[in-house]
Amino acid sequence: MTSSRRAVWLAGAAVLSWSTVATSFKIALSELTVYGMLLVAAPTALIVFALWLTVNKRWYKFASVEPRTWLNFALLGLVNPVVYYLTLFHAYDLLPAQIAQPVNYMWPILLLIMLAVFGKKPIAPVKYIGMAISLAGLTVISLGGSAISGSLSVSGMLWAFASAFLWALYWIINERLGRKADEDVCLFAGFLFGTIYLLAGTLFFPTGEFSTPGILSGIYIGLFEMGIPFLCFGVAIRTTTNPALVNQMCYLAPFLSLLFISMILDEPIVATTYIGLGLIVAGIAFNSRSATTAEAEPDATGSGGPE
């Protein structure tokens, strides 16, 4: 198997994995609290990253990490997994999965804005077209939300929007760290600090009761949202001869996710969800293909993958 074909298979596995997590979030939240769910999932992902470093004999890379970089890792772990996933899970706790997932997928649009505001990297005028298309999609989804649940939770929408902002922030921090440390080292170190924070947090925040189905669903999230797909996608993007194709495969994830939401959660998917999500993805795809300025171009890997 050629490296390019292998990369496509790995990216496909990551996309399929991310497509299931919106459904698994809702299932886990029916058994666990938001904090309890993350307390199971994050250490599971940490174990995955530790095994990956062991199998690939990459622990030696920690020897070259500068002390200041460890402080950056500490910040990275606070943003993801702790604050980001607590925010995202709160959104899923308050919203139908078919609403929370597309709103979270707005993060590439927010990233462009943040790079312009904080990174002083101006947005190419043509990209405002893509941003407008995606924002129109968000509006359509919001207007259609009442048809699903009777009334759309405003706080849930704010949580979902905040999760998109946090993922864009994480992308910026991780991108800067990536120039100083190995990508796999960044993943492990971030989740190491995140797990420490979560364990310390049990002294102050209630975790709720842990049922066997809840623990199993939390482990699933740790494996197939936070852990394995990021490794698969990382290898795919590093080894492919066609990175644009690998990135574009991620656009399939939110649509496949709606299929699982409908089949497993029995959520009736309303037309506005399809239309709104289509507009959001179209806007992101338009911007990724449009003429670029000097800024780094975000890919569409989503919410912790697209959630």
Image (tube, grey):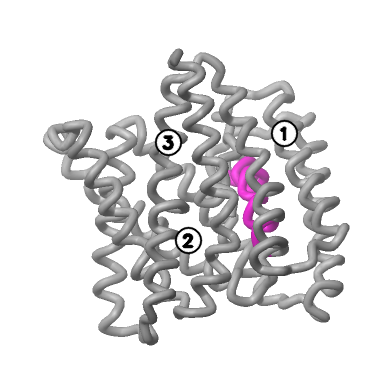
Which of the two labelled residues, at mark 2 and mark 1, occupies the earlier sequence position?
2
Q: Which residue is mark 3?
A: 232
Give the extent of the magenta segment: 100-114
Secondary structure, mark 3, is helix
Q: Measuring from the top left, give residue 15's x and y in whole percent.
A: 56, 41
Q: Is residue 111 magenta?
A: yes
Secondary structure, mark 2, is helix
Give me the residue at 28% from left, 67% from top.
197
Q: Quadrant of the N terminus?
A: top left
Residue 146 vertical placement versus 162 (above, below) = below
Q: Amino acid at mark 3?
A: Cys
Depth-wise, is mark 2 or mark 3 nearer the camera?
3
Give me the residue at 70% from left, 55% from top.
258
Separation of marks 2 and 3 at Cα, in angstroms: 21 Å
Q: Measuring from the top left, give residue 178's x and y in whole percent.
A: 36, 34
Does the CB distance between marks 2 and 1 fall below 8 Å? no
* Residue 184 falls in image quadrant: top left
Q: Measuring from the top left, give residue 294's x and y in whole percent.
A: 59, 23
Separation of marks 1 and 3 at Cα, in angstroms: 22 Å
Q: Quadrant of the C terminus?
A: bottom right
Q: Is residue 121 magenta?
A: no
Residue 190 is tagged as none
Q: Which residue is mark 2?
A: 84
* Residue 228 falls in image quadrant: top left
Q: Which residue is mark 1?
A: 285
Separation of marks 2 and 1 at Cα, in angstroms: 24 Å
Q: Measuring from the top left, give residue 140's x and y in whole percent.
A: 85, 58
Residue 91 vertical placement versus 167 (above, below) = below
Which of the two labelled residues, at mark 1 and mark 3, occupies the earlier sequence position?
3
Q: Is residue 256 left or right of residue 47?
A: right
